[in-house]
Amino acid sequence: MDVATLIITRGSKIEAVGSPTEPIIFTSGSPNPQSGDWGGIVICGKAPINTSYNGTQGLYQVEGGIDNANGDGLAGSGDALVSTAISNDNSGKLQYVRIEFAGYAFQPDKEINSLTLAAVGSGTTIDHIQVVYAKDDAYEFFGGTVNCKYLIAFKTQDDDFDTDNGYSGKVQFGLIIRDSLIADISKSEAFESDNNSGGGTVTPKTSAVFSNITAIGPRATLTNIGNSTYLAGAQIRRNSGISIYNSIIMGWPTGIFIDATTGTSTALNIEDSTLRLRNVTLAGNNINVRFAGTAGTTINSDAILTTWFTNSYFNNEILTNAADAKLIQPFNYSAPDPTPFAGSSGNQKILTGGSYDDLKFTGDTFFDKTATFRGAIAPAGINATWWKGWTKFNYN
């Protein structure tokens, strides 16, 4: 490995707790910083993961060339039993933190991300994090059960939220703002989700729950193109069972892409309600929903997937143009404002169309269920300003 990277090994803890007025900043040492100047932060926990390493199930060698003879790049417990103690593993705290210009391509498809969470347990506290100019992914979750709130990804190169290898945590309030010119040759999405690389049925299954995400893509209008390697707001593939609620996906070539081309058909997770999309607004996407690959029992085409997505029970919404979502300045790259216009007659589902009336929220105490709006930012109140003050968007 040729660049500096902060690695929190298994059994260790990071304690990086900033404040709204004094955030902790992990950044480049260059006088002219660029994405990829350093490796980022890698946290290795002991929570469940569906990989094996050297024949040991539940163990993972973190990609990017960070491992050594001491096993400092290993994550997971190496314990096939998924106990409560393992799931609750505590790797410390990250709060009010900016991670700037990080990420490193060690080899193709073996990169270090700005924030890598490898088998990190739910005893870990992660909230109010801004990743800026990520060279690869902004956040990648390899297995684990960690829960996160108030995450921002700004001008990422590859994927914003990448979930793999049995990640089963929860994320609420996530803001994604892309630059139309910055994307990765491997295709770029807000969400990319796999169960594992082969799309197998290994467990634990990737089953994360995301709520209140605003994912602003590269296309302010339907005729804008930007970088040609942008793919989708959400590419859910390889037998992933993630769910997205109360969110806005806008300005992408494709809004939702259910990709069943590898392994067990991802369509089966829709049909058994493992994978859920509810109270989601798609706005200004050239293609709203797309299906490819091996059919499920009933889902085998774009048309049938559209029928499922638009079923009134799920309360999803499709708006033709990004402007129809009525956010204040979503595509202003130096001074963005993704706040929805309050009192507008055309965006009522964004203002009031969030809900937690779903079995995946039953008994849950993590999600803020007073957030009955869609997207990361409320039109008013406490959840209207969480992204201000400790963040930075103008790097010119």
Image: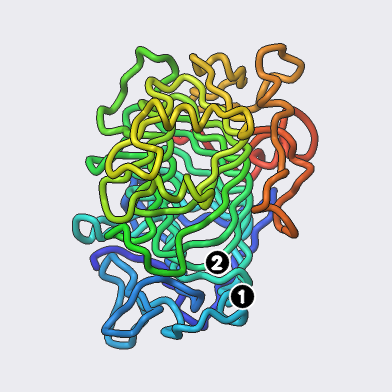
Residue that appears at 35% across and 16% down: 224
Indicate the quadrant containing the C terminus: top left, top right, bottom left or bottom right: top left
Direction left: furthest residue:
107
Looking at the picture, how far across and down is residue 39, in whole percent?
35, 60
Residue 375 appears in the picture as rendered: no
Type of the residue with mark 1: Asn
Give residue 59's quadrant in the image: bottom left
The residue labelled by disc 1 is 88
Q: Which comes before the other along the chain, label 2 or label 1?
A: 1
Tag 2's secondary structure? Answer: loop
Taking the image as shown, residue 308 lies to the left or right of residue 354, namely left
Residue 57 appears in the picture as rendered: yes
In this view of the protein, which residue sits in the foreground, 347 or 292?
Answer: 292
Residue that appears at 47% across and 19% down: 284
Residue that appears at 41% across and 84% down: 78
Direction bottom: furthest residue:
70
The residue labelled by disc 2 is 145
Circle 2 Cα neighbour tier, 10 Å, few/some/many (<14 / 14–19 / ≥20): many
In this view of the protein, which residue sits in the foreground, 202 or 384?
Answer: 202
In this view of the protein, which residue sits in the foreground, 326 or 286?
Answer: 286
Residue that appears at 37% across and 64% down: 201
The label on residue 257 is: none
Indicate the quadrant containing the N terminus: top left, top right, bottom left or bottom right: bottom left
- Compared to residue 324, the image places residue 48 above or below, namely below
Taking the image as shown, residue 319 lies to the left or right of residue 291, namely right
Determine whether label 2 and label 1 are within 8 Å by CB. yes
**Alpha carbon distance from label 2 to label 1:** 8 Å
Type of the residue with mark 2: Thr
In this view of the protein, which residue sits in the foreground, 346 or 37?
Answer: 346
- Compared to residue 103, the image places residue 255 above or below, namely above
